[in-house]
Image (cartoon, grey):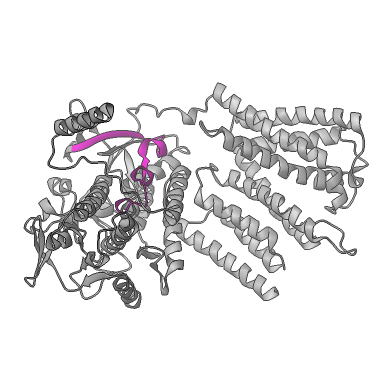
Amino acid sequence: MRRILIAIGVAMMAYAAFGAVIDDVNLVGVPIFLAAVLVLNDGIILPLVIATGALVQRVAPRAWQGWARAAAIISVSVTIVALPLVLGFGRSAANPSVLPRSYGRGLLLVLTLIWLAALARGLARRGNPARTAGVLTGLGVGVAVAVIEQAQGGMAAATADLTPGSAATITVTVIGGGLIGSVLRYRPGRLLSLVTTGVLAGLLWWAVEWLTVLPLLSGNQVSWSLGDAQASFGFLVGTMIQGGVTAGLIAAVSVLRPVRAAAAPAAPEENRPRVVIVGGGFAGVAVARRLQRRRSARADAPDVLLISDSNYQLFTPMLAGVAAGTLSQQHIGAPLRAGLRSTRILHATVESVDMSGRQITVQPEAGAAVTMGYDHLVLAVGSVPDYRGLAGLDRNAFTLKSLTDATRLREHVLRQLELADGERDGVRRRRLLTVMVAGGGFAGTELIAELRDLVHSVRRFFPRLDPEELRFVLLHSQDRILPELDERLAAHALDRLRAKGIEVRLNSRLTGVDADQATLDDGTTIATSTVVWTAGNSPSPLVRELGFDLERGAIACEATMQVRGRSEVWALGDCAAVPDLARPGEYLPPTAQHASREGAAVADNILAVLDGRMATPFRFRTIALLVALGHQDGAVQVGRWLLSGRLAWALWRGVYLTKLPGLEKRVRVSIDWLLDLFFPRDVILTEPRRGRAPRDRQESMASVSAGDDTR
């Protein structure tokens, strides 16, 4: 057993270190490390609870509004789960305490560090109305406790020398109220979460106050005994009420006195530097979010404007799930205004940029064009499909770059099933049931696997279709798919696709596509009405219009991500050619993990330049490569570590779930995935049937209704 516990402790330490490397050093990893120490100290219950709390914070950081509040939740979880479980095991006569002595010392250390950190964070917020509300509520509860004690009498043996109505007890209770109030913060629409957190914080304070602090003040030994816990059960209810009332009072104070930081962003001032960000993808949002975090500590914080042709940030790694019907399209898009409340958002497209005058002209969705100045311009305009001049590709092939693309593709595939179900000609039916994806990279591989799962999931609704007529084809121009992966893992992925019945054609290229067939470079034609192009992208057309030096079609940049020859213009993401300092002569790949970190680095460099310092070259190596290969199957590469199968599939989902912006989106996507495990996918078509005018459909419906009335 000890070896198992040591292995768990080492694994938890490794997880904490891995999380610190991926998401930079954060204080949430501290409880995980301390939990690992406790595990190595021959414990298992408390550390696992602390680790669970830390994982909850990693999954939903915004829901807990920072590590301080999350730390309090972790501590509460420890108290809630550990005490009843250990009570159930019982204690020996030599150690009658509720918790083993090693547990007690370790737990008190963890709780002390967490509460001190949370209190320091709360006290750092000047004029914090939550702290005032907590202190006032704590004072009221302290007086109420005194009245209750006088009416009932009796106290645990460990605190018999102190009366609950004494000055010391009231003081400790008031401190507890201040602590609870310091770690709570109200946000509109999250009253239930706030009250629940307050109640849990009150439960934790019961363990600290009545089982720890008061026995110490009375000169008794802190034993955490069963007798003390039972004797102070009434006060457990009181402290939980204290936490709930404190939370409610905090909400009331916050509504009556709104926090200024939650108000709408102030209008730009002439003496403040202006940063204009073009693009609302991973890179652009990362720049804005980093500037938003850093600007609060600066007196000369720049005015930040983000210009985007859509009002949401699209989580592109999950687009294949939308196309396959496992995810709703709204669930993988995060509104820009919700996540960037201190950043001005303009829904518009860029018309032109005057580099010499440092002005940019944009066309809003409505109204006349607007011209505005900037001090720093950030270009994160992404990429568009590159059809490479192939005949008919732009007219007859689908792409997967937007929610509209994914929705149209899903509708089309389901419509082909409907058409094939009523088609008697075998040749035409096989054409309708053939799906082709060109491009064996991550997007194409995941998409062909997802579309195959979609068709097989809904096939039960089309009993007249022969499974043998279903055909799925993946084209790739190289000698192996997924060239970014280790060769062994790529070969395994190829075998898994072929085992699922997917036809993979290597060293094959499209040369043309029409409505009924696709032509390959060897002259072969494949009858299909569904071709998806994922084999090539190019930077946004805006890049060529700006007149910058280009490298491989992208904006040529320095390692600092400043555009070559323009120190006030920055480019990053898919539209930029950023040198990879770890691989001389190469450029950073256009992936989400690179774009997000490039955004943070650009924001830091802009602030450095504004402060008169030098910009820092960007260095980053790919951490992990993940690909889903269909239902409960995947492949993952972290350095030299290779993983495949269900565990890799679960890791793919877990990693991307944590990267979704906001708790709401994570919950919605989790529910979508959960439902997909138990129910077939939907076959509803939302687009009208082609080839029939709306008036004809209305007349048809009217005739049907009339027939129903006459029966």
Q: Pinpoint residue 166: horizontal percent, then vertical percent.
A: 88, 33
Residue at 15 percent across and 61 percent down: it is 431
The image quadrant that residue 648 belongs to is bottom left
Residue 204 appears left or right of 597: right
> Is 104 placed above or below 541 here?
below
Check the picture and name the quadrant holding the C terminus: top left
363 and 352: which is toward the camera: 363
297 and 315: which is toward the camera: 315
The image quadrant that residue 440 belongs to is bottom left
**Hey, which residue is sitting farthest bottom in the picture?**
488
Query: Looking at the image, how many numbered discs can be counted on the residues?
Result: 0
Q: Pinpoint residue 701: horizontal percent, then vertical percent.
A: 22, 32
Q: Which residues are magenta?
A: 322-350
Residue at 48 percent across and 39 percent down: it is 297
| Residue 371 visible to an observer of this rendering | no
| Residue 270 visible to an observer of this rendering | yes
Residue 104 in magenta?
Answer: no
Q: Pinpoint residue 609: horizontal percent, then vertical percent.
A: 34, 46
> Is 150 placed above or below 563 here?
above
**Hey, which residue is sitting farthest front in the picture?**
711
608 and 514: which is toward the camera: 514
Residue 694 appears left or right of 142: left
Check the picture and name the quadrant holding the N terminus: bottom right
